[in-house]
Amino acid sequence: MTNRYNRIFHPLFIVVDLVGIIFAFWVAYYLKYGKFTFEHHYLTLLVSSLLFYVLLSLFYVLTKVPRTTQEMKLAVKRFLSAQLVFWFILTGFVVFTRFTDISRQFFGTFLFLQFTVLAVWRYGRKSIMQNLRATGYNNRFLSLIGSEVESKKLEQWIASNPELGFVYVNNFPFVQDEGFQDVSWSSVFGSRDTNGLPDHVLISDLCPSNVKKTVVEVAEDNGARVHLIQQVPKVLAQRTKLELFGPFSVESIRSEPLSIKRNRFIKRGFDMVFSLFVLVGFFSWFYVIAGLLIKLTSKGSVLIRQRRPGRNSSEFLCFKFRTMINDPNSEQGEGEITKVNDSRITLIGRLLRITNLDELPQFLNVLIGDMSVVGPRPLPIKEDREVRQVLKRYPLRQFIKPGITGHAAINGYRGSTPDMELMQKRIDLDILYVENWSFWFDLKICCITVWQMLSFRTGAH
């Protein structure tokens, strides 16, 4: 269920892309001038090129390696779009600056070579990941609840496409089996360890309605995306809102606006612009003041890095200003739940908490791509393990990136609490956000958050 490979491969892919750009720049310069020592204005152009590419890579999610044919087509479109923007930005950078000495021949050669190098690398990268997936790494697990014929069809599709990284983990009874309606689906899902739980569950239209209802509830409690198989030909499915999942036309149980590429681009663009604005205009000088006060009032580091669950339950290191006395367990997200008037909170820490300024360093996480400005607030690892066993549909909030602020947070449901009824309300609001995301919804939440910070009404403790 976790996506630990992203923490390794995504940064590696960006680094290799940057090496490819440097190589293309170096070759283009040598072809023009016959030497390798860059002049000052050329070096400035190279550094600017690398910076622009990193920003575009984060915005267009160029590090993702697709699994299906549809995703591959989208990946190609993203790459070509990013290249067009890259060319446009660099051309404007050269034309509207005073770099009149930069050779147009060199510049054209560089743009052509970097495109060629990155395109070839993308093909190689896809082959590498497909081979890894075919040998059992970076997999996604599928289960099907339906007939034996449907099960064999799905199994054959997976066996025919090992490079896509799907694993069939089905040991469920078939609809035609005796006692099918009496199956304990909680026991079936509960018998699996975390690494064997399905990421996707397909439910046949042959299943009785009462079984569908039960399976949906249990599957979502275990963090699976549920899809209902529809008996519609693939040709017709492409003309409707139905999705193609392997050999089947399916309808997803829940709406996920952020599963649409355009919406992800909009949200990622907002995240990058907003986080850069905050980091450059505010965090850059506030860090010095807050860091000095933290150091003067208690021993320990200025920033802490807590392990938190991110999108699809993958863990990441969440940055925060230290607001408590030095406690390694708390800093790792394994400490006791923070309570009202907690004696561990320092004087400056209390002020940072009630204004939400302790979370300001998380804009670094947003820029990196682990978090979003708006989304479900991530719980500490220890609490995450505990509440997911109790709360209904808890894993669904992790279908998207966690946020610095969120729909539940602005409605007073934030921080840790032993009251599971209040926590369930928080989860329900988070899921409501996941299903109803829009750019204007994000803006509204940001505006309310700023007002709550200025009026000291964040509800934090």
Image (cartoon, rainbow, N blue to C red):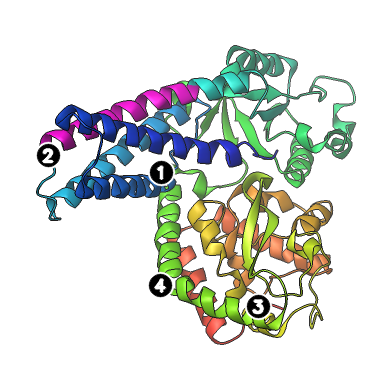
Which dot marks residue 103? 2
When asked about the image quadrant of residue 439, the answer is: bottom left
Q: Amino acid at mark 4?
A: Gly
Dot 3 crowding, Cα within 10 Å, few <14, some 14–19, many 20+: some
Disc 4 is placed on an element classified as helix
> In x, y percent, where is residue 323?
69, 75
Residue drawn at (39%, 35%) of the image: 19
Magenta stretch bounds: 103-126
Q: Is residue 203 visible?
A: no
When asked about the image quadrant of residue 187, the answer is: top right
Query: 200 above or below 164?
Result: below
Q: Is residue 111 visible?
A: yes
Q: Earlier in the sequence, mark 3 or mark 1?
A: 1
Dot 2 crowding, Cα within 10 Å, few <14, some 14–19, many 20+: some
Distance, label 2 to label 3, CA atoms, is 52 Å
Q: Amino acid at mark 3?
A: Lys
Q: Main secondary structure of the magenta part?
A: helix
Q: Earlier in the sequence, mark 2 or mark 4?
A: 2
**Where does the N terminus fall, quadrant-wise?**
top right
Which dot marks residue 295? 3
Q: Amino acid at mark 2?
A: Ser
Query: 453 above or below 139?
Result: below
Q: Viewer-proximal residue, 115 or 67?
A: 115
Please name the residue that numbered disc 4 is placed on: 281
When asked about the image quadrant of residue 3, the answer is: top right
Please name the residue that numbered disc 1 is placed on: 57
Q: Earlier in the sequence, mark 2 or mark 1?
A: 1
